[in-house]
Image (cartoon, rainbow, N blue to C red):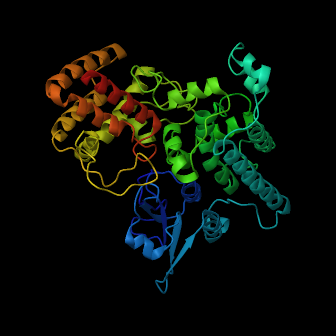
C-alpha cells in the first residue's frame, strides 16, 4: 500500500475493474478517511481511490460535489455491476460496515467484526465503541478548552523547586485527570487479551481501526499542548504493544502521520489547542516537534526519535529498504540507514523538482502577493503565486539540496560532512547575496509544509527538513 495509490487490485488480474471508489482527503489529515482506507487494505478489497481536499485547506472539485453535495469525506461510490447505476455513501462507520458485509469470510476476506452468533464478541465491541467515544470526549475536553484547577497556592510555588513534572503529575487538572483515567481504561482493555489487539486475533479488527486513527492524533496533541507522553512512557504498556503491532502493519504505515503534521492539521478540524498540562515537558516537546530546539530538524540528526520511534516497524517502504541493501532495519548500520532515508527524500524531491521549486518560491518577498482565497489551515495557500524574480535561484538551491540528499559516495558521516561543505560553497556561489534572504525564506516555506504521509514517511521527512535547514543556515 502507498498513500499515492489510485487503484488497488490485490490478487485480481490487471484487467479487473473494481466497482467501488473511495474518496479520501488529499493530505492524509482526515482520521475517518484513515480508518476506512486501512480497512480496505486489511481486507484487501479491490477499489479505485480518489483524493479530494478537505475544506480546511482547499476547494472540492465540482465533479465530487455532484456526487456528494455536502462535501463530506470519506465517501464511497458503489457501481451496480448490471445496471451501472451508482450509489454514494458517507460516514466512515457506515462505509466500513458496508464494505465488511460486502466482502465476507466465506469469499476469502478476513473478518473485521465478530461472528454474527458471537454474542459476547458483539457485546464487547459495543462496550469498546462507547469507550472510544468516552476517550474522544475526554481528549476534546483536555485539548480544546482551557484547563482549570490543578496547581495552586503553595504547590504552585513548590513547582519551581522540584525537578521535572513531580508536582504537576501529582496534581493534574480535572480535565487531565479525566483523560488519563479513560486512557487507563483503554489500556486495561488492550491488556485483557493475550495479543496486542482488542480481540484475540492475528490482525486488527474494525474496533482497533476506529481507535487508532484518533489515538494517533492524541499522541501528538497531548505531547505538544500538554507535555504528556503517552506512547513509550511505560505507563500504558497495552497501548505501547498495540502501537508496536500497528507499526508492523503495512496498512497503517502507509497512512500514518507524524506529530508535526498532526499538530498542524488538528486546529483547522477541531479548533485551537490550549497550552497547559505538564509545563516543563510541554515546552520541551513542543519545541522539538516544531523544529525549534536546534536539534530535531538540524544536522546531525539523532538515530531515533523518543516521541515518534522510527524502528518499531519499517521506517521506509520495503522496496526502498531493499534498494539500500537493508534486510534488518532494527539492526542496520546507522550510516546506511540514515543514507537510505535521505536518499528517499532526495528521490521524492528529484521526481517533482520543478513543481517544488515553483511552490517554494511563494516564500519570496514578492510571492503569495495575489488576492486569493484563505483557508482555515494557516499553512494552506493553494492559489498563491511564486516570486518569479527568485524562482531560478530557488531551483538552483533545491538542486544542491537534492544532490546532498542523494549523495551515494560517502561511506561515513564524516564523508557526508565533506559533501555538505562542498554544497555550502555551491549554494553561496549559485545565489547572489541580494537574493539569499528570499531564497532562504522560500526553503523555509517548503520545509514547514512537508506533510507526512502525503509527501514522504517521517524517516525521510526529517532528513529533508534538516537538509533544508542546513541550506538555509548556509545562505544566511
The front one of 260 and 405 is 260
Q: Is residue 381 above or below residue 245?
A: below
Furthest residue toward front: 153
Instruction: Identify which residue is drawn at 41% across, 53% down.
Output: 4
Is 390 placed left or right of 25 in the picture?
left
Instruction: Identify which residue is drawn at 65% across, 29% down.
Output: 232
Instruction: Identify which residue is drawn at 46% across, 70% down.
Output: 18
Question: Residue 268's x, y, as percent?
Answer: 51, 51
Question: Residue 62's x, y, as percent?
Answer: 38, 71
Q: Is residue 389 above or below residue 111?
A: above
Is 75 placed left or right of 423 in the picture?
right
Instruction: Identify which residue is drawn at 49% across, 73% down.
Output: 68
Furthest residue toward bottom: 83
> On the image, which quarter does residue 50 sit in?
bottom left
> On the image, which quarter does residue 237 sit in?
top right
Res 256 visible: yes
Screen quadrant of the C terminus: top left
Question: Residue 216's x, y, as percent?
Answer: 60, 43
Res 431 visible: no
Q: Is residue 111 above or below residue 300?
A: below
> On the image, which quarter does residue 375 sit in?
bottom left
Is 100 placed left or right of 425 in the picture?
right
The front one of 404 and 90 is 90
Question: Residue 13's x, y, as percent?
Answer: 43, 65
Q: Is residue 70 above or below residue 39?
A: below
Amino acid at each position: 500500500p502507498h498513500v499515492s495509490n489510485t487503484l488497488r487490485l490485490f490478487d485480481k488480474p490487471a484487467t479487473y475493474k473494481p466497482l467501488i471508489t473511495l474518496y479520501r482527503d488529499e493530505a492524509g489529515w482526515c482520521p475517518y478517511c484513515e480508518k476506512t482506507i486501512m480497512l480496505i487494505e486489511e481486507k484487501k478489497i479491490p477499489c479505485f481511490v480518489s483524493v479530494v481536499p478537505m475544506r480546511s485547506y482547499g476547494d472540492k472539485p465540482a465533479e465530487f460535489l455532484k456526487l456528494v453535495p455536502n462535501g463530506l469525506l470519506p465517501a464511497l461510490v458503489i457501481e451496480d455491476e448490471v445496471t451501472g447505476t451508482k450509489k454514494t455513501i458517507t460516514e466512515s462507520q457506515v462505509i466500513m460496515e458496508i464494505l465488511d458485509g460486502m466482502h465476507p469470510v466465506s469469499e476469502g476476506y478476513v473478518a473485521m467484526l465478530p461472528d454474527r452468533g458471537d454474542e459476547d464478541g458483539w457485546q464487547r465491541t459495543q462496550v469498546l465503541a462507547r469507550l472510544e467515544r468516552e476517550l474522544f470526549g475526554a481528549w476534546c475536553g483536555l485539548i480544546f478548552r482551557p484547563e482549570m484547577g490543578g496547581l495552586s497556592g503553595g504547590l504552585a510555588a513548590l513547582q519551581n523547586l522540584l525537578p521535572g513534572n513531580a508536582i504537576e503529575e501529582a496534581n493534574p487538572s480535572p480535565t487531565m485527570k479525566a483523560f488519563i483515567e479513560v486512557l487507563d481504561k483503554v489500556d486495561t482493555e488492550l491488556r485483557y487479551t493475550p495479543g496486542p489487539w482488542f480481540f484475540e486475533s492475528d490482525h486488527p479488527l474494525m474496533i482497533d481501526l476506529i481507535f487508532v486513527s484518533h489515538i494517533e492524533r492524541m499522541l501528538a496533541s497531548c505531547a505538544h499542548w500538554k507535555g504528556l507522553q503517552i506512547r513509550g512512557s511505560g505507563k500504558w504498556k497495552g497501548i505501547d504493544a498495540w502501537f508496536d503491532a500497528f507499526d508492523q502493519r503495512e496498512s497503517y504505515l502507509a497512512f500514518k502521520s507524524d506529530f508535526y503534521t498532526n499538530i498542524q492539521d488538528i486546529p483547522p478540524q477541531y479548533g485551537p489547542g490550549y497550552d497547559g498540562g505538564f509545563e516543563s515537558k510541554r515546552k520541551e516537546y513542543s519545541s522539538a516537534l516544531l523544529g525549534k530546539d536546534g536539534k530535531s530538524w538540524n544536522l546531525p540528526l539523532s538515530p531515533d526519535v523518543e516521541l515518534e520511534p522510527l524502528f518499531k516497524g519499517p521506517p521506509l517502504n520495503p522496496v526502498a529498504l531493499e534498494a539500500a541493501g537493508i534486510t534488518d532495519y532494527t539492526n542496520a548500520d546507522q550510516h546506511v540507514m540514515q543514507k537510505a532515508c535521505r536518499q528517499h527524500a532526495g528521490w521524492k524531491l528529484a521526481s517533482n523538482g520543478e513543481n517544488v521549486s515553483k511552490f517554494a518560491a511563494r516564500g519570496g518577498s514578492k510571492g503569495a502577493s495575489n488576492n486569493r482565497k484563505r483557508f482555515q489551515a494557516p499553512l494552506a495557500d493553494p492559489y498563491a503565486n511564486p516570486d518569479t524574480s527568485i524562482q531560478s535561484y530557488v531551483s538552483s538551491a533545491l538542486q544542491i539540496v537534492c544532490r546532498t540528499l542523494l549523495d551515494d559516495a560517502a561511506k561515513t558521516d564524516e564523508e557526508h560532512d565533506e559533501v555538505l561543505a562542498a554544497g555550502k560553497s555551491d549554494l553561496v556561489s549559485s545565489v547572489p547575496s541580494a537574493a539569499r534572504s528570499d531564497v532562504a525564506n522560500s526553503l523555509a516555506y517548503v520545509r514547514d509544509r512537508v506533510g507526512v504521509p502525503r509527501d514522504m514517511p517521517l524517516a525521510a521527512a526529517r532528513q529533508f527538513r534538516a537538509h533544508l535547514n542546513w541550506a538555509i543556515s548556509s545562505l544566511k
